[in-house]
Amino acid sequence: MVARVSTTFAPTHAPSPARQEVRRRTRVLALPEARWALAAFVAFLLGLALDLGDGVSHWVYGLLYAVAYVAGGWEPALEGLRALREKTLDVDLLMIVAALGAAAIGQVLDGALLIVIFATSGALEALATARTADSVRGLLDLAPTTATRLTEEGEETVRTSELAVGDVLLIRPGERIGADGSVLDGASEADQATITGEPLPVAKGPGDEVFAGTLNGTGALRVRVERDPADSVIARIVTLVEEASRTKAPTQLVIEKVEQRYAVAMVAATLAVFAIPFAFGADLTDALLRAMTFMIVASPCAVVLATMPPLLSAIANAGRHGVLVKSAVAMERLGEIDATALDKTGTLTEGGPEVTDVRPLPDSGLDEDALLALAAAAEHPSEHPLARAIVAAARGCGLRIASAEYFMATPGRGVVAVVEGRVVGVGRVEASVDRVRGVGGMRDSGDRRPGADGMQDSGDRTHGADGMQHLDDRRQPFPDVDADGTIVLVTRDDTPVGTLTLTDRLRPDAPATTAALTALTGTAPVLLTGDNPRAAARVADVTGLTDVRAELLPEDKVNAVRDLQQGGRKVLFVGDGVNDAPALAAAHSGIAMGRAGSDLALETADAVIVRDELATVPAVVRLSRAARRLVVQNLVIAGTFITGLVLWDLIGRLPLPLGVAGHEGSTVLVGLNGLRLLRESAWRSGPAQDS
């Protein structure tokens, strides 16, 4: 039989009341199927006890058996009749017909036993499905449940689901943004890697767009809601999970197509099993009993259940480990891949910076260590990723980081601070750093603080309206920086003293991941990147890749994927889901990096790496292959049981209770076998080269 469970997915948080409610709903007795099965079981046991006793009228235990029939059989009977109206023969209905037929020929006890085992099997399947859905819900802890809405009366805390277009929200520093919208006022930076895949926080000011689920930086923002919460990226993730629970893998579709023809043939065979012996003089009751036993054991319930439990369990297990697989189709396809192609930035690299080059200007009087220590001192109070990278580099070199005073940061432009009496600025070369005036009540012109009036500009520099030195007219030009990355300028008392280069950091698990993918497919992954050949070669050398294709536009990546797929190869492409969207769509399977993924990732990729862990890519491929193997095992188990029981009934004499137990037992066994993939060990299993 096939359990029918209606589930509704919603974003939750592990410690929240909503999450606790989810768990409460998946307890055994919280499921309607389980309650009806329990009622049928209790009624059957009471009826059996009275039936075996003495001096009890048959109508008393007969009434209890009737309760067992109704409690355990009304729902599948109703669903079967609905399917029949749509000209579809439901095998569950055949089970009910068999039970009623047994009662009609006086085998009331056997029919009730069939109903009870049938209902118990359905309850177990419903529980397994609900627990699987609950496991998937665990990955939806991505969006805030409440937001601060501004009204004429002041502030109020509301659920994000209640927000409407036009509402104005207050986003405090460090809070997650509750809805997609635009900034009305305020200045901050937003870590929106969960949405756009961008590795660094993006400066936000009036008019800029912000996204639900992204993390606000150190500033406060007033945001106008521009999009209904139901249309946000987080809400779309919920929709994708719902769709994943409803989709059917190609194997399942084939089974269901065959099932209809098989069911019709089974009914015809049942009539033959009854009519032929009866025509040759067999007893009516015996002929009917054999025919109904045949119909029960020949029903393809276990075959129908062979495919989806393994695939849905694999989806749930992947979800618990930060991989959102969009559908059962996608999960099945992941196990078919025999070649891989990888993007570089944001995929093999973290999208996070590290200092790779320190270059003091010739007459700055600083060496590399002194320049790095100076920059780290100014950046130390900042929480910006570039600042953390600079401070980490200085600490890694064992340098002393001086304390900073009068620290001020301008989102998107840089920082200014006083370090040991000197005004130090650190910012990107392409962005000027404002001189901050009036800090700390500065009075005399000798102050070495940001904005001190006594700071005189030397004649060899030009300044713009903001008082900052322009970089096109200096006595000492910047050195050529032969590196791919972000270049930051370090100034001391408005005089440039050097540059730092920060490049994208290679993921620690990148070499192991490429090795695992090589073992899985038998060929090393291909590196496809829009970056320059030098940067691509640097990553390829560390990860052991030999086929490197650099400076590719999005359409070039699509062509590369199609070239790899010539000859029937099935390519898995892994990218960041933004510029890589066309290649993700062109590949046999696509996986997008970036926590919750970008909009394009959710539209084009088969799976999204929610937690941004590259090592999950080979793990989910292994899990898919394990699911495919369990599907084959289940089909073998189901076919063996059906064949054995049918032959027993045709050649020998299979008792009805034993036939019921064998049929329903095989159904439960197949379901439980598929649920093995919910175990933690299924995720941790080593590489498998077979498919």
Image: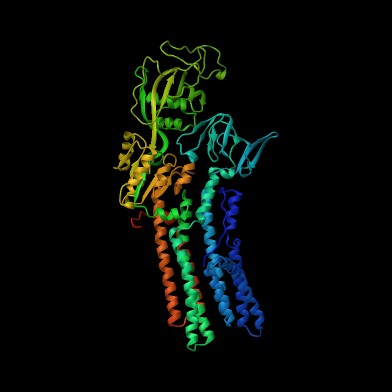
The residue lying toward the viewer, choosing from 377 and 638, is 638
Which residue is found at the position 53% from the left and 43% from the top?
A: 233
Which residue is found at the position 54% from the left and 67% from the top?
A: 87
In the rendered view, would you say 363 is above or below 102? above
In the rendered view, would you say 480 is above or below 24? above
Q: Residue furthest top?
A: 459
Residue 274 pos. (x, y %): 50, 82
Residue 327 pos. (x, y %): 47, 53
The residue lying toward the viewer, choosing from 198 and 455, is 198
Q: Quadrant of the C terminus?
A: bottom left
> Can residue 3 be seen at all in this image of the molecule?
yes
Residue 501 pos. (x, y %): 38, 28
Choose top left, top right, bottom left or bottom right for residue 554: top left
In the rendered view, would you say 607 is above or below 63? above
Which residue is found at the position 54% from the left and 44% from the top?
A: 234
Q: Residue furthest left?
A: 546
How many marks on residues?
Answer: 0
For the rendered model, the colour scheme is: rainbow
> Can residue 669 be seen at all in this image of the molecule?
no
Residue 312 pos. (x, y %): 48, 57
Choose top left, top right, bottom left or bottom right for residue 93: bottom right
In the rendered view, would you say 32 is above or below 595? below
Q: Residue furthest bottom?
A: 281
